[in-house]
Amino acid sequence: MSQTSKPGFGPLRGIRIVDLTIALAGAFTTMLLADMGAEVLKVESLQHYPTASKGPRNPPRGDDAASRSARRDYPDSDPGHDPWNRLSWFNAQARNKRDLTMDITRDRGRDLFLRLIEVSDGLVENNAAGLLEKLDIGPDVLHAVNPRLVIVRMPPLGLWGPDSEATGFGWHFEDFGGFLRVQGYPDGPEVGSIFMDGSSGPAGASAFLMALWQRSRTGKGAVCEMAQVENMICHIGDLTMDAAMNDRVPPRMGNRSPAHAPQGCYRCAGEDAWLALTVCSDDDWRALRTVLGDPPELEDAALDGLAGRRAGHDQIDRVIEEWSSRVAPHVAAETLQAAGIPASPVLNERDALSDPQLHARGFFHLLEHPSCGTHFHAGANFQMSRTPPEIWRAAPTLGQDNEYVYKEILGVSDEEYDQLVADGHIGTEYL
Amino acid sequence: MLSVMVQPMEGLLVIDLSEGIAGPNCSKLLADFGARVVKVERPGGDPCRQMGPFPADVPDSESSGLSLHLNTNKESVVVDLGTDEGADLVGKLIARADVVIESFRPGTLALHGLDPLKLLAGNPDLVVTSITPFGQTGPYRDWEMTEIVAFAMGGMNASGIAGREPVKLAGHVVLMQSGATACSATLGALFHARICGEGQQVDVATFETQNGSLDRRRYYLLSYEYSSTMAERSVAVGAGRPSVGGRFECADGLTVTTGRIWPDHIARMVSILNDPDLNDGWRTYGPAVVGECPELINETLARWAAARPARTAMREAQAGGWPVVVVNDPLLLLSDDHLRARGFWVTAQHPVAGELPYCGPPWRIDGAGWVLRRAAPLLGQDTDAVVAELAGLDAIRISQLRAKGVLA
């Protein structure tokens, strides 16, 4: 499909969303909505370089290990002359979106922005609490222009409360959210993750869609507040229950399960090759012993029950690894799955990109990008039988859709357009 | 006139046949925002009821902390779908529904005469959301999955320490996120059904929600496409173990973290710490003081933290634009000052588990929308009432079906 064709697909066809997100969490929300067919217009400013979204303006070009590693997120490890258009963080989630430039900190830009709001259905942002108000585009201002607007705001700790002004990176809020104390090796360090960004995407999308659902009944827009830390905590509700029920910090269990045994990640034949498995039942346990060739160490009747397997977990792990270390991980996993045991190789990026299941389902899409060339991109995170998601183009370059948005949506004349270029609102390079 | 608050999903009937974690998390989100969710359980109940945590670690199918968390605001009906009468009864419930959520192995619904296409033929604006490990199609469609397997297939290679085994995330977060993604897709399909009168099947595969997640995996995949390099395992992902900054113990025994100290924040940190030696270091080196004097910074941070309670340290730093936060764990979260002030923890009574604090709203719509109307149901608590109301069964028929084991 051509780069400029206008999509008409998905359950959200005809729904227009103004995207004021930064970094990843908010962008993940608008990606999910774009994959359902919403027209997502990412508003950027030539005057404000968004490092958190587009990486460093001048990426390290040296030959030391750190510089080389920093360049892995660019095509052929080359940031090129337009690194902001070539970064995987942005390009992986911005496919299907449109990109325009507008300096909303100046009156003219703000006026144009409000005209865009007037003809839109939604606004999504994940800036620090209070930023919209500082720009004088708070919800009251927006709703005065368009009472049907659904506004999704995703500040880390919410819009109000004693610490709502607190800022930080994902790693700060994972620690604040109680994740790191319960995540990592039982005998070694806690391990960080970036789970907050991952969990915020679907939550922001659901909040938008619930308010849209409500609007179809009431005719009125809404302000959705998605405090990212609170939503993240909802994903460990079982652990907060443990804390409440038993007045304790749940133990850091590494790869083990509170409900099943054995469970773990085992070394396989090959470099950095690993197998994960869970024995979920006594039946699984008998099947595992058969797969392992009925090793005598596992004949102990005490191991036939969960309590015994928990007590003997270390010993069981050693026997499993003795077997797995002689087998390729995908062979081990296929053998175990054929016996009904949940198991899988640890799939690195190369494995996933050649995975037969993901390809059979059409998960990856080959997309051509003006600056990056042609690559496989991860597609939609769900399928729908009647209104299937489409992945219709690669991520936009900076300002790629200026003409479309200004002339077709806002009805700006050619003369006016040229003046906006001269005034630094419209362009394709940061100033 | 009294204004009656209407929850956003009020009026919606969801028949939830799903088990485990992902499916029930999807229906939880709909239930907590006002949908009526009828949880159809197999005799003996959703296996999730057997998964901990339990009070005093004593297993009891009515007090699983996981199940209590996931099944708030739902009604429980026990039906043996393996019997003709049970399948027929579930068909009658579905005939009244706006949404069906299911997590069976692909093809199972059809075995019971409940093929999604057939359901849609009888109920054209129905949304059938199937949440499975690998989706309805493809060579792995019948494979089994658990939390660790889900993460192994989508990002675990980059979690942990190089050389050691990769390590999973806390709890069941990957499966929870799969359910949350399914909720978004279900809401999209519902919107289409409302506008166009056309229902459909939504096919959510945890394999795809995880490989498509922006917990980095999605862009790591594109980075590999771009440069053939893979993400390495490093605890530095996230909080990490920075050599400068990190966690420090405070006067009240709690901990704060600075995380890795970002270049933009160094001047603010120096000004807030206001230590004579560090001020000298700043005058000499500027922002490079972090690299030049790591011990000086760590010592100053430690002294500063030890002189004040953690929350005070966080607020002093944040007021000066330097991101420092209190380090919580699941137990500390329950008394966190900010979360309590926002009313995040919501207490409910449960007949077996007693009074407990539940996670509150993941989001709020105009400040509201989420209500804990009742705690998770006991197994089969609503069987009689629901089959009488929604399937029109009279008391005699209900007792016949109970006697046969079709209902419980």
Image (spheres, coloured by chain):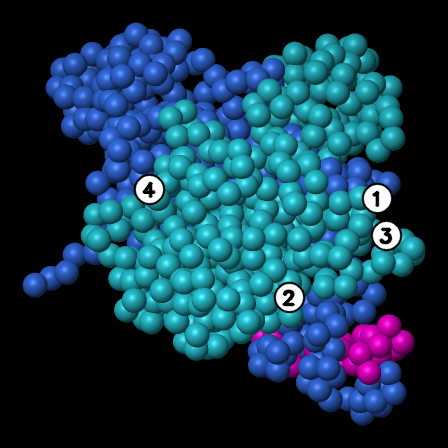
Choose top left, top right, bottom left or bottom right for residue A276: top right
Q: Which mark is residue A68?
A: 3
Q: Three-letter amino acid code at disc 1?
A: Ala
Distance (Cα) linking label 3 and label 4:
49 Å
Q: Which label belongs to residue B162?
A: 1
- Magenta stretch, main secondary structure, is helix
Q: Give the Cα distance between marks 2 and 3.
A: 24 Å
Q: Nearer the observer, disc 3 or disc 1?
A: 3
Give the amino acid type for the residue marked by disc 2 in the picture.
Answer: Tyr
Q: Secondary structure at mark 2?
A: loop
The answer as to whether the residues below labels 2 and 3 share one chain is yes
Relative image position of residue A236 (x, y in whole percent): 54, 47
| Residue occupied by mark 2 | A430
Residue at left offset 56%, top offset 53%: A400
Relative to B282, does residue A255 appear above or below in the rendering? above
User: Mark 3, chain letter?
Assistant: A
Looking at the picture, how far across and down is residue B317, in whole percent?
Answer: 63, 79
Closer to the camera in the image, B231 or A404: A404
Residue bounds of the magenta highlight:
B286-314
Residue hosting label 4: B31
- The residue under label 3 is which amino acid type? Arg
The answer for which chain carries disc 2 is A
Secondary structure at numbered mark 3 = helix
Please name which of the two marks, 2 or 3, marks the residue nearer to the observer: 2
Which quadrant of the figure contains the C terminus of chain A? bottom right
In the figure, what tint was chain A given? cyan
**Quarter where residue A337 is shown:** top right
For the residues carrying marks 2 and 4, which lies nearer the camera in this image?
2
Alpha carbons under labels 1 and 4: distance apart: 42 Å
How many residues crowd mark 3 within 10 Å: few (<14), some (14–19), many (20+)? some
Q: Residue at x 89, y 76 (%)?
A: B292
